[in-house]
C-alpha cells in the first residue's frame, strides 16, 4: 500500500492482477498477431463463406418511431421476380427476446419481427428472401404496411415524466425494472459524507452527452446453411459468439446442439455486434426455404440515434499535495439513459 502525504491511500495491490506495469507499448513497434492476414487480404470474414444457390434476406422496417401494425400486405412482393419467401412474425417460433434474458436479467420485450406494434423507427416487421440482394430490396419496397401512428417520446427526461407516451408494454412507465419492482438501481461504496467533508473542492454540474454510435467498416451480418443430421451452420461476425448462439437457440426453439456457430475475424464492432439478431433470422430463413441464406446490413448503415445519455452529476475531489493530479474521493451520480433497441437503416 502506498500512502500520499495527504493521507489518501493508493491501494494498488487491489488492482495488481488487472494490469502489468511492464506493458508500456506507447512508442514501441509492436507487431499485431493478425496484421499479416489483414494487410494481405487473407483474414477470413463471415461473408467470405459462399454457397451455391445462396439466397438473400432483407427486412421491411417501420418508418415511424411508434405505431400499431394494422395490416401487412405481401401479395405484390410475393409475385416479384426472384422472391422465394416472405417471413413475418408468425414464422418465428419464439418471437420475443432480450439479450439480458441470457443473464437472467430483464424482461423479454423485443420482437424479432414485430406483429402488433413497433417501438422505434426502423423496427423490422417482415423479411424478404430472394435470389439476389437487389431483388430482395425491390420486394421490400413492394410490401404494404398499414400503420396507425402513435405518440412517441425521444427525450430521456421527458419519457420519465408522468403522462409521457408509454412505448413498451413490458415497461409501461418507460423505465427499466430492477429486481421485479424498482425503477432504479443504487450502487454505494464507502463513506460518502466523510469524503465530501474532507474534499478541498466540491464540483457540481449537469452534463449531457452527445450521440455516440459504433461505425465499423464491416456491418452486422450472418450466413446460414444446412448441415447433416438436422443441424444448421451459421457464419457470423458477432463479437459474442455464445451470446449469439444462445439467442438463436432461444428464438428458434432449437437445442444448441443443432446449431454450429463459426466466428472469425470481426471487422470492427465496439460493442455493436453483441446483440445482433441477424443470426437467428438467417437460420430461420434456411429452415423455411431449405437453402443457404445471407442477411447483412448494407455498407454505410447507421443506427438511428437520439441524444442518449443525461447525467446529473455531483463530484467531490481532493487535490494531491505537491502534484498536478487531483484525486476524486467522493462521487454522487444520477444517470438516466436510453437502453432500448435502436434502428439500423439498411436502405
Image: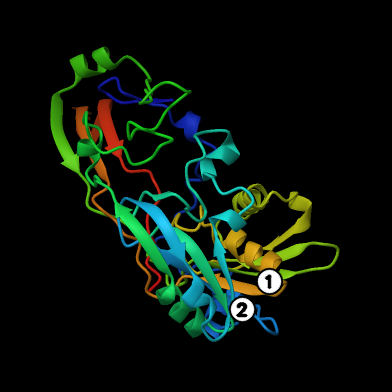
- Mark toward the start of the polypeptide (2 vs 1): 2
> How dense is the environment of label 1, judged by Cα within 10 Å: few (below 14), some, or many (20 and up)?
few
Left/right of residue 206 with respect to residue 279 in the rendered view = left
Q: Residue at x 56, y 60 (%)?
A: 238
The residue indicated by pointer 2 is 55
The residue indicated by pointer 1 is 289
The x and y percentages for residue 241 are 62, 55
- Tell me the CA gap for discs 2 and 1: 9 Å
What colour scheme was applied to this rendering of the protein?
Answer: rainbow
Can residue 170 be spotted in the picture?
Answer: yes
Q: Residue at x 30, y 23 (%)?
A: 8
Query: Looking at the rendered structure, which numbered label has been put on residue 146?
Result: none
> How dense is the environment of label 2, judged by Cα within 10 Å: few (below 14), some, or many (20 and up)?
many
The x and y percentages for residue 290 are 72, 72
The x and y percentages for residue 312 are 20, 32
Q: Quadrant of the C terminus?
A: bottom left
Front residue of 305/268: it is: 305
Left/right of residue 342 with respect to residue 211 in the rendered view = right
Front residue of 33/345: it is: 345
Q: Which residue is drawn at 53% across and 71% down?
A: 128
The x and y percentages for residue 103 are 58, 37
Q: Are marks 2 and 1 in contact (CB under 8 Å)?
A: yes
| Res 200 → quadrant | top left
Left/right of residue 242 with respect to residue 172 in the rendered view = right
Question: Secondary structure beneath disc 1?
Answer: helix
Q: Quadrant of the N terminus?
A: top left
| Res 169 → quadrant | top left
Residue 340 against residue 84 in the figure, above or below? above
Amino acid at each position: 500500500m502506498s500512502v500520499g502525504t495527504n493521507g489518501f491511500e493508493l491501494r494498488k495491490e487491489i488492482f495488481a492482477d488487472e494490469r502489468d506495469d511492464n506493458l508500456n507499448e506507447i512508442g514501441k513497434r509492436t507487431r499485431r498477431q493478425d496484421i499479416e492476414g489483414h494487410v494481405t487480404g487473407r483474414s477470413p470474414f463471415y461473408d467470405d463463406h459462399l454457397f451455391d444457390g445462396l439466397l438473400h434476406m432483407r427486412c421491411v422496417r417501420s418508418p415511424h418511431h411508434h405505431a400499431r401494425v394494422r395490416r401487412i400486405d405481401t401479395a405484390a412482393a410475393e409475385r416479384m421476380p426472384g422472391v422465394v419467401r416472405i417471413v413475418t412474425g408468425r414464422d418465428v417460433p419464439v418471437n420475443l427476446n432480450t439479450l439480458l434474458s441470457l443473464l437472467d436479467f430483464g424482461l423479454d420485450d423485443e420482437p424479432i419481427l414485430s406483429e402488433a406494434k413497433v417501438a422505434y423507427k426502423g423496427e423490422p416487421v417482415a423479411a424478404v428472401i430472394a435470389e439476389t440482394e437487389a431483388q430482395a430490396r425491390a420486394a421490400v419496397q413492394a410490401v404494404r404496411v398499414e400503420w396507425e401512428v402513435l405518440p412517441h417520446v425521444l427525450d430521456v427526461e421527458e419519457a420519465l415524466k408522468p403522462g409521457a407516451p408509454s412505448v413498451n408494454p413490458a415497461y409501461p412507465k418507460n423505465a427499466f425494472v430492477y429486481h421485479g419492482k424498482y425503477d432504479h438501481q443504487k450502487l454505494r461504496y464507502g463513506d460518502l459524507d466523510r469524503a465530501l467533508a474532507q474534499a478541498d473542492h466540491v464540483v457540481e454540474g449537469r452534463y449531457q452527452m452527445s450521440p455516440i454510435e459504433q461505425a465499423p467498416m464491416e456491418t452486422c451480418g450472418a450466413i446460414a446453411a444446412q448441415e447433416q443430421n438436422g443441424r444448421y451452420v451459421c457464419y457470423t461476425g458477432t463479437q459474442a459468439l455464445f451470446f449469439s448462439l444462445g439467442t438463436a437457440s432461444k428464438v428458434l426453439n432449437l437445442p444448441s446442439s443443432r446449431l454450429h456457430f463459426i466466428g472469425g475475424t470481426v471487422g470492427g464492432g465496439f460493442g455493436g455486434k453483441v446483440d445482433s439478431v441477424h443470426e437467428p433470422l438467417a437460420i430461420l430463413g434456411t429452415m423455411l426455404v431449405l437453402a443457404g441464406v445471407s442477411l447483412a446490413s448494407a455498407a454505410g448503415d447507421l443506427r438511428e440515434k437520439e441524444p442518449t445519455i443525461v447525467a446529473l452529476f455531483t463530484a467531490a475531489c481532493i487535490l494531491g499535495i505537491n502534484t498536478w493530479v487531483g484525486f476524486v474521493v467522493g462521487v454522487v451520480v444520477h444517470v438516466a439513459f436510453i437502453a432500448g433497441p435502436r434502428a439500423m437503416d439498411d436502405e
